[in-house]
């Protein structure tokens, strides 16, 4: 097991070392990295590593212990647990004499930021690639920053570790944290400038080392940034293939094709055919979904739209896709059935019964008329979930004006029927929605 001389980077408040070694053990339980400041005294264990490890990074945050010419020593130990006893084998001690930013570096070349928008899955994603310059053997990181066009401030994207074994190479990274390609939330429709440099510093704060910094320490530990690479993020793509299907009396299932991967949510809009503008029903529907059940009114035809939205955070402006597709749904309103009407044992009344088929009614309206003649008039209104009633009155009219009620004519045939009723809101107006009436039944009050 042979360890290489460690690489070092001078950092504002820390020194970072990269160590590599050859794994010559076949049955080790793991590796241990020990550190000593100076060349006398005990070592301190700073890391435990899994078996088959061959490299690691370690950072010393006590800058005052790492002044120029201070000796830093490392040893890598393979260990094995055997019957409760630790068996260990140590590599030779290696050391580094601290310098502060010595050695040449160069800015990476052929820096490219490529849009991957050819498929839905790649919409809104970016790939970064560059060529490490040959003089970069003293760099430890490639640092990428960006800014939205027109902004003064820069945002740190990432510090990508420099491979000590590869001097010239092509390297590609997907933008994102922990492999998530939509991290950093680049705003659709906006243009961004990206920059790269070589650095010995593992910094993330661009106010400390702004582009164009000129202090001696800054120039010693960082190369100049590359020329900007300009990329325009595409607008959020609108959903397509929108359908609206009634599931039951008060539920509609919306389905659509997700054409974008950079939306943060969906917005559902709806209106009645008689209305001129759509109303937002919800704007926080989870991104990347393609179906949603929404609650609506029974017995109602509605038009629906779906938009994809992007919002970076709570204070940001919302970016909307278009919403050109409209889907129409019509929900049922189940009518009562099995309707019967018989002479009541109570004088002057009729007893009626029906089957309640709806779960959406607010009330029931019972109607009557002289058998086979004229329009039905209201005889009674009863609560929802009712399945029987006793009727002894009907509405009295003069022309089209209701003037009161009148008793049912005795020993005269009357037609009776019942319908379910609910209400919906259109703008600021409450509208009545009635189911189809039940079949009618004829009987007399006596």
Image (cartoon, helix red, strand yellow):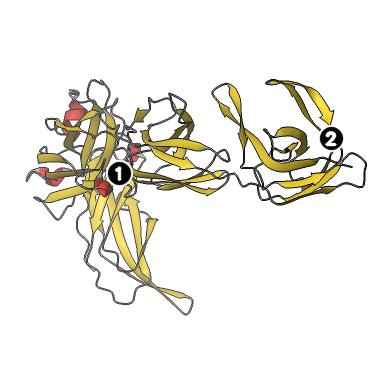
Q: Position of residue 394 (x, y in %)?
A: 79, 32
The residue drawn where x is 30% and y is 31% is 187
Tag nearer the camera, 2 or 1? 2
User: What SS does tag 2 mark?
Assistant: loop
| Left or right of 334 on screen, residue 354 | right
Query: Which residue is at 14% across, 56% downward?
Result: 165
Query: Counting residues from the N terminus, which is met first, the one under dot 2 or under dot 1?
Result: 1
Q: Quadrant of the C terminus?
A: top right
The answer to which of 284 and 130 lies nearer the viewer is 284
What label does residue 409 carry, if any?
2
Task: Count neighbours of disc 2 (C-alpha within 10 A) and say few if under 14, some if 14 to 19, many if 20 or more.
Answer: some
The answer to whether residue 302 is left or right of residue 216 is: right
**Relative to residue 74, is residue 220 depicted above or below?**
above
Residue 21 shows in this picture: yes
Q: In 3D space, how far apart are the residues under numbered discs 2 and 1 (Cα atoms)?
A: 67 Å
Task: Using the image as rendered, state which of residue 186 and residue 87 is in the foreground.
Answer: 186
Where residue 332 appears, as percent x and y from the top left, is: 55, 45
Q: Residue 238 lies in what quarter of the image?
A: top left
Residue 51, placed above or below residue 149: below
Name the mark on residue 147: none
Q: Quadrant of residue 159?
A: top left
Q: Is residue 124 left or right of residue 298?
A: left
Task: Give the SS element for disc 1.
Answer: loop
- Which residue ends up furthest to the bottom in the rendered image? 83
Circle 1 sits on which residue? Answer: 259
């Amino acid at each position: 097991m042979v360890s290489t001389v460690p690489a070092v980077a001078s950092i504002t408040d820390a020194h970072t070392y990269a160590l590599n070694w050859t794994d010559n053990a076949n049955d080790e339980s793991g590796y241990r990295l020990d550190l000593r400041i100076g060349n006398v005294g005990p070592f301190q264990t700073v890391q435990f590593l899994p078996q088959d490890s061959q490299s690691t990074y370690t950072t010393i945050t006590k800058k005052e212990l790492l002044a120029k010419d201070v000796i830093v020593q490392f040893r890598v130990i393979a260990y094995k647990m055997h019957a409760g006893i630790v068996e260990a084998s140590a590599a030779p001690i290696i050391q580094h004499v601290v310098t502060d930013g010595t050695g040449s570096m160069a800015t990476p070349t052929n820096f490219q930021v490529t849009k991957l928008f050819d498929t839905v899955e790649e919409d809104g994603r970016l790939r970064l690639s560059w060529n490490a310059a040959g003089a970069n053997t003293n760099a430890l990181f490639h640092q990428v920053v960006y800014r939205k066009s027109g902004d003064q401030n820069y945002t740190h994207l990432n510090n990508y570790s420099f491979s000590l074994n590869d001097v010239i190479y092509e390297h590609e990274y997907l933008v994102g944290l922990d492999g998530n390609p939509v991290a950093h939330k680049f705003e659709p429709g906006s243009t961004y400038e990206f920059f790269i440099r070589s650095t010995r510093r593992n910094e993330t704060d661009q106010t400390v080392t702004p582009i164009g910094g000129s202090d001696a320490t800054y120039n010693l530990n960082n190369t100049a940034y590359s020329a900007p690479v300009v990329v325009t993020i595409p607008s959020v793509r609108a959903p397509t293939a929108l359908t609206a299907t009634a599931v039951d009396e008060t539920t509609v299932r919306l389905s659509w094709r997700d054409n974008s991967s950079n939306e943060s949510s969906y917005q559902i809009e709806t209106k009645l055919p008689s209305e001129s503008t759509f109303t937002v029903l919800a704007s926080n529907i989870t991104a990347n979904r393609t179906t949603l059940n929404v609650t609506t009114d029974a017995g109602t035809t509605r038009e629906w739209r779906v938009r994809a939205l992007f919002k970076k955070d709570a204070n940001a402006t919302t970016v909307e896709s278009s919403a050109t597709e409209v889907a129409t749904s019509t929900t049922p309103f189940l009518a009562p059935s099995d309707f019967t009407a018989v002479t009541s044992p109570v004088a002057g009344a009729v007893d009626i019964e029906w089957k309640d088929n709806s779960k959406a009614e607010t009330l029931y309206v019972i109607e009557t008329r002289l058998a086979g003649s004229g329009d039905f008039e209201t005889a009674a209104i009863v609560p929802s979930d009712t399945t029987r009633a006793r009727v002894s009155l009907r509405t009295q009219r003069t022309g089209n004006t209701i003037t009161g009620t009148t008793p049912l004519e005795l020993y005269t045939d009357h037609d009776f029927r019942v319908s379910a009723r609910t209400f919906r809101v259109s703008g600021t107006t409450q509208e009545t929605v009635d189911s189809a009436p039940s079949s009618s039944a004829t009987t007399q009050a006596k």
